[in-house]
Image: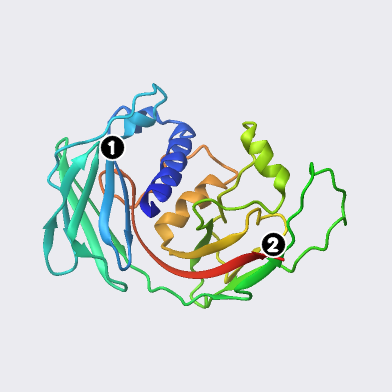
Amino acid sequence: MKSFKLHLIFVVLIAFLLSCVKEKQAYLDSTSAVVSGYLYAGHRIDSILISESNSYSGDGVFRTIDDLEVLINDGGQDYRLDFIGNGYYQSKQIEVISDKEYSISFRWNGADIKASTHIPLANHAQISDSIIYREQITGNGGFGPGSFERPDPIEVSWDNTDGDYYFVLVENMEDSAEYIFTFLEELIEQGDSIRRPSFRSRPEIVDFYGIDSFNDIQQFGRYRVVVYRLNSEYAALYEQLGSSSISISSPPTNVDNGLGIFTGISTDTVYFEVKKI
C-alpha cells in the first residue's frame, strides 16, 4: 500500500512532465527506461517498477520492461531482485537501513542504467492531541457558517533543522467508520464522490502540519498520521511541476542513462482518535 500510493503519485508527475517537454520527441522516441523505485527505511524492497518512456507519449499503451537482471547494492553486497510481473521487481532479502547508501543497476537496450540514493533518518513526530471529541450531526447538511463550534486544529510537528522536504498522509484506520455528518453517508449511498478516506499534504520544507478538525475530519475512529521525510530527487519532481516555465528540455531524474526516480524515504507515525460525544 505504501509503495503503491507513491508509485501512483510518481506516474502522474512523470507523465505530466514528459508531456510538457517542448522537444520531447528526442527523449520519448529513444525509448529510455523509467525507474520508479522507493526504498523505505525499516522495510523490504517490495516493488520497483521499470517501464519504457514512450509509455508516456500519449498513445495510451503502458509498456513495462520485464525479466531484467536488476541489482541492488547496499554498500557492501549486490542483491539480485526477483521479477514478479508487470514490470515490478522486489527482494525479500534486503531490509532497508536508515543512513545508508543504496544503488540500483541493470543493462537494457545497450545501456548501463544506474542510480543511487541515501536513506534519510526518521525524525520523531509529535502530535498536539491524541483524542478529540465531536458531536454527530444529523440532517441534510443545510447549515450555515457558525452553526457549530469548531474544534481546535490538530498540529503535527517535527524537527527540520536540516531543511528537508516532508509530506504528511492522514488515514482513517477503521474498516467501517461512522460519519460525523450523517448526510455524507447518505450522499455516498446515492453515488456521490464526496468521501475522503485519506488525505495528504504536498512535499514542502516544513516542520509542522495542521489538520483542520472540522473540515478535514469527516469520520469517527482512529487515525494514522504518517510523516514522510524525502530526499531532494523526489522533491525535484514537485519543484518542476510547480515551475512557471514548463518548456524544459528534460524532466528531473537521478537515473543515469534513463529517467525516473530512485529514492530513499523514512517515516514516523503518530495517531489520534475522534470520539463521539
Q: Within 10 angstroms of label 2, few (less than 14), some, or many (20 or more) residues?
A: some
Q: Name the residue that disc number 2 marks.
A: 213
- The quadrant holding residue 221 is bottom right
Q: Within 10 angstroms of label 1, few (less than 14), some, or many (20 or more) residues?
A: many
Q: Is residue 277 left or right of residue 9?
A: right
Q: Position of residue 53 (x, y in %)?
A: 32, 34
Report the residue at 19% width, 55% height from top.
91
Q: In this orientation, which residue lies closer to the viewer: 118 or 228?
A: 228
Q: Is residue 123 left or right of residue 172?
A: left
Circle 1: residue type: Ser
For the residues carrying marks 2 and 1, which lies nearer the camera in this image?
2
Q: In this orientation, which residue lies closer to the viewer: 134 or 83?
A: 134
Q: Is residue 182 left or right of residue 148?
A: left
Separation of residues labelled 2 and 1 (CA atoms)? 40 Å
Q: In this orientation, which residue lies closer to the viewer: 182 or 198?
A: 182
Q: Sequence order check: which comes first, mark 2 or mark 1?
A: 1
Q: Position of residue 38 (x, y in %)?
A: 33, 55
